[in-house]
């Protein structure tokens, strides 16, 4: 088994655990996957700007709480990373956005019929 297959199996296991242990937030991510993906690509890749859930909600049709839940789930999956832990809103840095991992998450969610292929 190659390292690529092992890492994909590990990611698949992480997704299954999130679904089991954080089912409400996981469902929010699934319901808004393509919107949050577009937001991450917009801020992290196109603009190269740091972003928060409030900034996402100001630019995309998502409530800040919904954006926050999605970003929390994607942080758990290693797609985005918080600049630093603090009591203020989590700020995600563009250089810590892993679009390749997000694409793998999308593939797994599609294969498991969690989201429709877009």
Image (cartoon, rainbow, N blue to C red):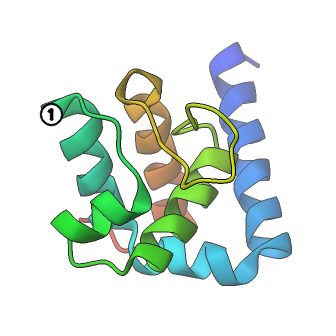
Identify which residue, 6 or 40, lies in the foreground.
40
Tell me residue 42's x, y (percent). Answer: 19, 45
Looking at the image, residue 43 lies above or below residue 32: above
Question: Is residue 62 visible in this depiction of the protein?
Answer: yes
Position of 82 compared to 46: left or right? right
**Residue in the picture at 41% in, 53% down:** 52
Looking at the image, residue 71 lies above or below residue 91: below
**Residue in the picture at 39% in, 67% down:** 33
Tell me residue 46's x, y (percent). Answer: 14, 33
Tell me residue 24's x, y (percent). Answer: 68, 84
Q: Quadrant where the N terminus lies?
A: top right
Question: Is residue 113 visible in this depiction of the protein?
Answer: no
Q: Which quarter of the picture shows residue 23?
A: bottom right
What residue sits right under mark 1 in the picture?
Answer: 47
Looking at the image, residue 47 lies above or below residue 108: above
Position of 37 compared to 88: left or right? left
């Amino acid at each position: 088994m190659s390292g690529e297959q092992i890492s994909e199996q590990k990611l698949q296991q992480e997704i299954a655990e999130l679904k089991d242990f954080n089912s409400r937030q996981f469902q929010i991510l699934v319901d808004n996957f393509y919107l949050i993906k577009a937001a991450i690509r917009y801020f992290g890749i196109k603009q190269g700007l740091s972003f928060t859930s409030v900034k996402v909600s100001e630019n995309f049709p998502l409530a800040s709480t919904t954006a926050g839940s999605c970003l929390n789930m994607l942080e758990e999956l290693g797609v985005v990373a918080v600049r630093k832990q603090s009591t203020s809103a989590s700020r995600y840095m563009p250089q810590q956005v892993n679009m390749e991992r997000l694409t793998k998450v999308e593939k797994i969610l599609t294969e498991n019929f969690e989201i429709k292929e877009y």
